Amino acid sequence: MRAPDGSPVSSPVSSPVSSPVSVRARDYSWRHAGRSTPAVSGLTLDIEPGERVLLLGASGAGKSTLLHALAGVLGEGTGPDAAGEEHGSLTLDGIAPQLARGRAGLVLQDPDSQLVLSRVGDEVAFGAENLRIPPQEIWQRVRTSLDDVGLRVPLHHSTAALSGGQKQRLALAGVLAMQPGLLLLDEPTANLDPDGVEEVRAAVERVLERTGATLIVVEHRVSVWADVVDRVVVLAADGGILADGPPSQVLSAPGNRARLTAAGVWLPGNRPAVPEPAAQHAGSELLVARGLAAGRGKRAPAIVSSVDLALRAGTSLGITGPNGAGKTTLALTMGGLLKPVAGTLRATAALAGSAGTDPGRWKSTELVTRIGTVFQEPEHQFLTGTVRGELAFGPRRAGRLTETEIASLVDRLAERLRLTALLDANPFTLSGGEKRRLSVATMIATEPDILLLDEPTFGQDANTWAELVTLLRTLLAEGRSVVSVTHDAEFLAALGGNVLHVEDGTATVRTTAQKAALKMAGKEAARK
């Protein structure tokens, strides 16, 4: 066995596996600085060593905040979690989480915020090194963890070159290599393709069988973890616990199903109530690609080649494919944020107006009013200190509206996307689902003709998912074009339109969104 630098590593001598951890919460609350209401409030909860818990609740119910508290990172450092007000008690094995570092391992919603080193092998080894695991054992853990999560790249591979889904696997591998007694997973499969979902779930199961660790996993899609956990806890939006018990009892009892559906929980077999998509009426061509090749940089090799498409007003296009296939790179190229490696991308007069035909040459004010791009990681496009400031930033820069009109627009968007109570909050303190809705709203605010969305349904409960679908359908009916990079089969079916499938370096329009969604759903069902 050799480390990434090529040096040999002697046969491993196993360190003791961390003991499973118990969790105790007594009337626990946490309020972020600058927020009028707590993110978590009135929580009393006992989790025994070795229990496997699925933590559910509406978007914004405090699930991620609770995981951060259990990991001991609330009230620490200089980030958005650094300042706040805490009440009640929260302990791991009877001691405060801040004093139990190393007993808990946390995989964050945004893997980019968790990665610190430039090479894959070093990144996975980092946590174990900080726990003073013997060097001769670390690299065995690194390889085992990477194999477990299905991330098959060289140890010296650049972390910056990974796709969002691959980074998610890498973050999980780093935590698995630490072998913590408490495994905290915050939407670990949200940005993964169906194969990746199965590999990650299987990896977690193997680790739990091997170590007996306690598991708390947050995931909106209940079906992914329902047969892995032995307990389901549902947080109430106004504090405390809405439901708690075995999966069969919590998810199937008639009385519970009605309450959980109202709370936006994704119950197995329940599809959010949205009408069938209306027929799309294609308008003028807006963006035309011919022989387009996309890569990360003008001199970089193409990740996706020979793309031919014409994007029309009033139509939806889904971009699908496995993790690492180049979906995001293609979308960023279509959005004028990356230069094509080869071929052409041309904006028609209907889109460009007087700005010219090359989106890559447009000024920022020209771009945001024509093509609005929502990144996979919402934090990467936050620019101000409040939600209100984020919503007003684009329209103010575009210069089309008065301050009174901007204020009215901000209020309307905030109400539409359930952000009104958060207008004065720091965007970085929002939940993952709230951050995603905010990033979508900031692009809608500039009224672009094309809206490009990368994993738009990440972090959404069933209610906010349906509201987002309804909003995007309204934009389509107004003649906008919506392009979505997604693994969400139900979302594809709900929006309709066409699908561009990216795999093995090529992108082809395969089928309608409804047929593509059925195919994706069939693959997922076959794995269960």
Image (cartoon, rainbow, N blue to C red):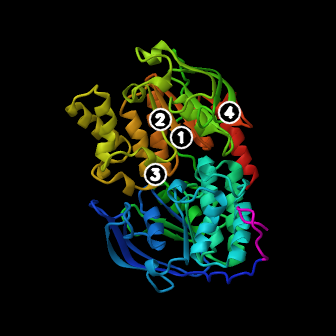
Q: Nearer the viewer, residue 244 or 12?
A: 12
Q: Is residue 202 visible?
A: no
Q: Is residue 352 visible?
A: yes
Q: Residue at the left extreme?
A: 404
* Eye-nearest disc, 1 or 3: 1
Disc 1 target residue: 454
Count how many numbered circles sit on residues in the image.
4
Disc 4 target residue: 304
Q: What distance separates the C-alpha of mark 1 from that of mark 2?
A: 8 Å
Q: Is residue 456 magenta?
A: no
Does dot 2 land on a helix, a strand or a loop? strand
Does dot 3 land on a helix, a strand or a loop? helix
Q: What distance separates the C-alpha of mark 2 from that of mark 3?
A: 17 Å
Disc 3 target residue: 433
**Mark positioned earlier in the residue sequence (4 or 2):** 4
The part of the chain drawn in magenta is 1-11
Q: What distance separates the C-alpha of mark 4 from that of mark 3?
A: 30 Å
At label 2, counting other C-alpha atoms closer than 10 Å, the crowd grade (few under 14, some 14-19, many 20 or more) is: many
Taking 493 as reference, is 357 above or below it?
above
Disc 2 target residue: 373
Q: Are marks 1 and 4 in contact (CB under 8 Å)?
A: no
Query: Mark 3: which amino acid?
Result: Gly
Taking 210 as reference, is 361 above or below it?
above
